[in-house]
Image: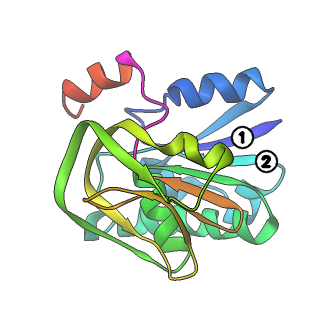
Amino acid sequence: MRALLIANQADTDPGFVGHLLRARGYCFTEHMREQHESWPAARELAAGVDLVVSLGSAWTVHAPEFAEAVAAEAEVIREALRTGVPFLGICFGAQVLSVAAGGTADRAPRHEIGWCDVEVDPDLSGPAAALSGPWMQWHYDMCLPPPDARILASNDVCVQAFVVPGALGVQFHPEVTESSVSRWCSGPD
């Protein structure tokens, strides 16, 4: 099975999420946000893949200097959703999903860095209940999902997990490893 991974050049490690997907037979094709101008058309990127995963970023979705890259990524997400290719957005990826699906992303009322509690919608049970508890966070922005999104989890800062048909966005970092945190703490390259 093929998975398309969208990430920044300095941080292409899907960590634990990647380990789990590889164990289930996925192999990754990477596309770097910094090279969005050389990407094939969104239709070509989403064709023939079984999953699209978009990782976090030090970028800000709503910053003008990243508008073209965000638009290119949002187009890939819309194409995946249109053609039934499942999508997982992590942190920045969830924020781009929010934008692609008709919502927005904006500055959070305060940043979350470290292990932060996430509360699952009390009406949820089954696998969704696993979203509850402390998760590694590293963000200054937040998702404002479209009105038709189903909010799965949140905390006093922002929406932490949501779904739109065919896609899951999480503001926290389920992929994080000790190496990831070490790299993030060392600052941008």
Q: How crowded is mark 1: few (under 14 residues within 10 Å), some or many (20 or more)?
A: many
Instruction: Residue at 36%, 36% (x, y): give it.
Output: 134
Residue type marked 2? Val
Label number found at residue 111: none
Main SS, magenta residues: loop
Picture quadrant of residue 4: top right
Q: Residue 122 location, x and y as percent?
A: 51, 58
Instruction: Residue at 58%, 80% (x, y): give it.
Output: 148
Instruction: Decide: is 165 above or below 174.
Output: below
Label number found at residue 49: 2
Check residue 173 for magenta coloring: yes
In the structure shown, which secondary structural element does the residue marked by tag 2 occupy? loop
Q: Residue 75 location, x and y as percent?
A: 59, 69
Residue type marked 1? Ala
Check residue 179 for magenta coloring: no
Instruction: Decide: is 52 above or below 79.
Output: above
Magenta residues?
A: 171-178
Q: Residue 177 location, x and y as percent?
A: 42, 21
In the structure shown, which secondary structural element does the residue marked by tag 1 occupy? strand
- Kindly indicate whether the residue at mark 2 contacts the one at mark 1 (C-beta within 8 angstroms): yes
- Left-right relation of 127 to 179: right
Q: Which residue lies furthest to the front in this view?
A: 122
- Left-right relation of 33 to 19: left
Instruction: Identify the image quadrant of the N terminus.
Output: top right
Q: How crowded is mark 2: few (under 14 residues within 10 Å), some or many (20 or more)?
A: some
- Residue that label 1 marks: 3
Picture quadrant of residue 18: top right
